Amino acid sequence: MSIRLKYLLLALLFLSGYSYAQKPIVTGHIDGLVADTINFSYPPPPSEFKGYFMQDKVPVKDGTFTWSLNEIPEPHQLFIKFPNGEIYELYLENSAIHMEGNINAIADLKVTGSQIHDDHVKYKQLVSDLVQERIAIIKNAKNSSGQEKAEAKVKLTDLENQEAERAKVFINENPKSYYSMMVLGRIHKTIDGNEYKSLYDLLDPNLVQSSSIGKSLTEHLGLLQNGETGKPKTAEIGDQILDFTINDLENKPVKISDFRGQYVLIDFWASWCAPCRADNPNVLRAYHQFKDKGFTVVGVSLDLDLESWKKAVKDDKLPWTQLSDLKGFGNEVAKYYGIQSIPTTFLIDPEGKIIAKNLRGQALFEKLAEILD
C-alpha cells in the first residue's frame, strides 16, 4: 500500500464515514425563482466563535445558482433567504451539495450531498409535531392571564421532556452522526447526569475529540455533580446568584454583588451570536423604560476576541456594564451554571436572588412591568 493511500484511508477513518470534499459547494435549481440574487448567511467556523454572520448575495439565473466557501473545519449552518421572505436552514460540510424544488414549497426542497443535513431533516421530522404544539402554546399564552401562563409553562416543560425522549432514540439510532452531538447539546438540561453520560458514551470519539461542540459536551460532562441524581448545576428560581467577579471593557474587576439594591438582568451573549444581537434592541428598550425604577442590565460576553466584543457593544449602542474573561463558553460563570447556548438571561432581585430566567421579547417587558410599575 502506498503511503499516500495509507494516509487517505486514515483520514477517512478519522471522519467516521463522512464523505468530505475540499470545500463546501452549494448548487441549486428552484422552479419559480425569478430574483437576480438570493441571500446566504453563515457563521464563522464554530471553533472560532468570533465575528458576525457572514452575508453573501448569490447571483441567480433562470432559477439556478452556485455558491462555494473555503474549506470549513467542521459542519455548520447556512441560512438561505428567498425573495418571498422564507428562510431555509441548510447544514454544510465539505462536500458538493445540491438543492432542487419550487419557490412555493421551500420547506420541501430536496437536498443531496450532505449527511449532516440529512440527519437534521430526519430529526426535524421526528419532533415536528412537538415544535408546532410549542409554537401554538407560546402564541396563545402571549395575551393570557397569569394562571393560563402558568399552565402554559407546565405544558412547555412536558413538551421538553417528550422531545428529550425522542432525542434519546435519535442518538441511539445515529451514534456516529455529527448531528447527534448537536441533539445532545439541545437536551442536556432536560436529562439527568446518568442519562447524559450514557448518551455521551455512544457518540463517535473521533468526532467528539475533533469538534468544538464535542469538546463543549466533554466539558459539560466534567461539570456534572456526583450526587444522587448526577444533574448539572443549574440556576433555579429562588437561588442566590453566584457572587462572581469578571473584568469589564476597561479591564477593571466588577462583582455582581456591586449591583445589590437593583433588579438586574444578567445577559449572557456574544458578538457572534445572531439571536443575541437580534434581541439587543429589545433589551435596550427595556433598559431605557425601567432604568429609573431600579432596573439595570449586566452583559456577560462569551466572546474570545476583545475587538469583536468591543465593536458589537459600540455598534449595538449598549450603555450598561459589560463583562467578559474572553474564554468563550469556558467563562467560569457559564461553566458553573452549565450554560451551553446563548442568549441566556437571569433576572435577579435587589437581594441577589434569581426571580426569572430567559426572558426575551415581550416577556421581559411584562415581568419588569409586573414588579416595577
Image (spheres, rainbow, N blue to C red):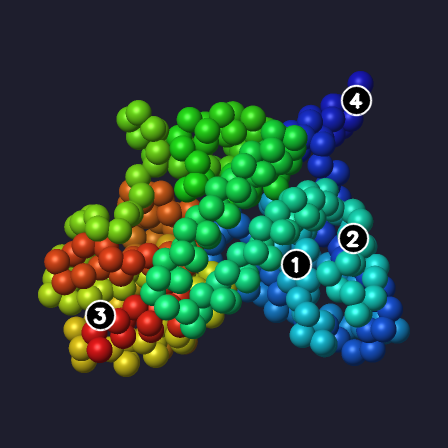
Residue with the mark numbered 4: 2
In the picture, which quadrant includes the C terminus? bottom left
Q: Which residue occupies the foreground of this view, 312 or 105? A: 105
Q: Are marks 2 and 3 in contact (CB under 8 Å)?
A: no
Crowding around mark 1 (Cα neighbors within 10 Å: few <14, some 14 to 19, many 20+) is: some
Tell whether 338 sits left or right of 94.
left
Crowding around mark 3 (Cα neighbors within 10 Å: few <14, some 14 to 19, many 20+) is: few
Q: Which residue occupies the foreground of this view, 42 or 281? A: 281
Marks 1/3: CA distance?
Answer: 39 Å
Q: Are marks 1 and 4 in contact (CB under 8 Å)?
A: no
The residue that appears at 24% across and 57% down in the rendered structure is 355
Q: Which mark is residue 371?
A: 3
Residue with the mark numbered 2: 111
Report the mark closest to the observer, 1 or 3. Answer: 3
Tell whether 41 sits left or right of 106.
left
Q: Amino acid at mark 3?
A: Ile
